[in-house]
Image: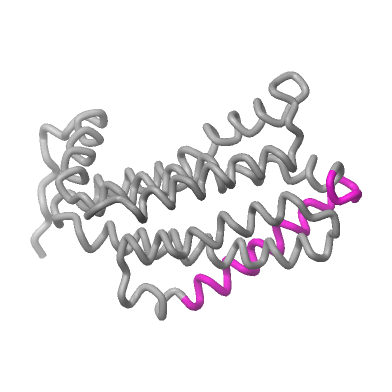
Amino acid sequence: MCIRDRDPTPTPVFQSITNGVAHAKEKTEAWRALLVVGFISVFGVSHVALSPSFTANNLGRDSSDFAWLGVATGFGALIGALAAGSFTAKSSLQRGVLFATPYCILLLIFSRVSDFGVAMLIQAFVGFFYMASFTTLQVVVQELVAEEFRGRVMSLFQIAWAGLVPVGTLIMGLLASSKGLDLGPGNTIALTSIICLVYLILEMLRPD
């Protein structure tokens, strides 16, 4: 069995990231997919940080009940994951953006509801479209990048997907907190959902 020797001069982390970014930019749709994922992570996915205060202030429930919203979102994401094969067979940037659009619209509707049951139902659909969109965009990136750069670019995808969420939670906190702009959880989720929608509309109108 042949064992491949380890590269004696491994590429520094910063250089690897730089190379990944440069290659992704060469594959225009892959780069745009990464930007969509990062933008939605910051202004969409990060809304989960406001779930406890939203549950208490907007839904009139104990803040600990926010966990049930997470359960509903997870259930929807599970269904989306199980259905992934059917909606990633013909993956494209446009298809990923189209799946992300109802995700943002549903978050906007969610921000206005006051009934806990309705909120849970909406979150189930939020979870579904979240998984549908991000899985589709992940396939787009994987299919477009060259084999030798796939690891580096997919690392960027993971940063955009999960690594930027803490940045988003900071923004959400500053917008919602009484020590920030004091918009409250509902208005903050509504504002950031609109920001996401505007970005997605601009992306759909952007010429290829």
Which sits in the foreground, 170 or 17? Answer: 170
| Residue 155 image position (x, y, % from top left) | 32, 45
Q: Is residue 66 above or below residue 117?
A: above
Q: Residue at x 68, y 38 (%)?
A: 188
Q: Magenta region, mostly helix, strand or loop? A: helix
Q: Residue at x 21, y 46 (%)?
A: 24
Please tell me whether residue 77 belongs to the stretch shown in magenta.
yes
Please tell me whether residue 91 belongs to the stretch shown in magenta.
no
Q: Is residue 2 above or below residue 34?
A: below
Q: Is residue 193 left or right of residue 96?
A: right
Q: Residue at x 36, y 50 (%)?
A: 203
Which sits in the foreground, 173 or 15? Answer: 173
Q: Is residue 162 left or right of residue 11?
A: right
Q: Which image quadrant for residue 98?
A: bottom left
| Residue 138 image position (x, y, % from top left) | 35, 59
The span picked out in magenta is 58-83
The quadrant in which the N terminus is found is bottom left
| Residue 123 image position (x, y, % from top left) | 68, 61
Q: Residue at x 48, y 46 (%)?
A: 198
In this view, the residue farthest toward the bottom is: 86
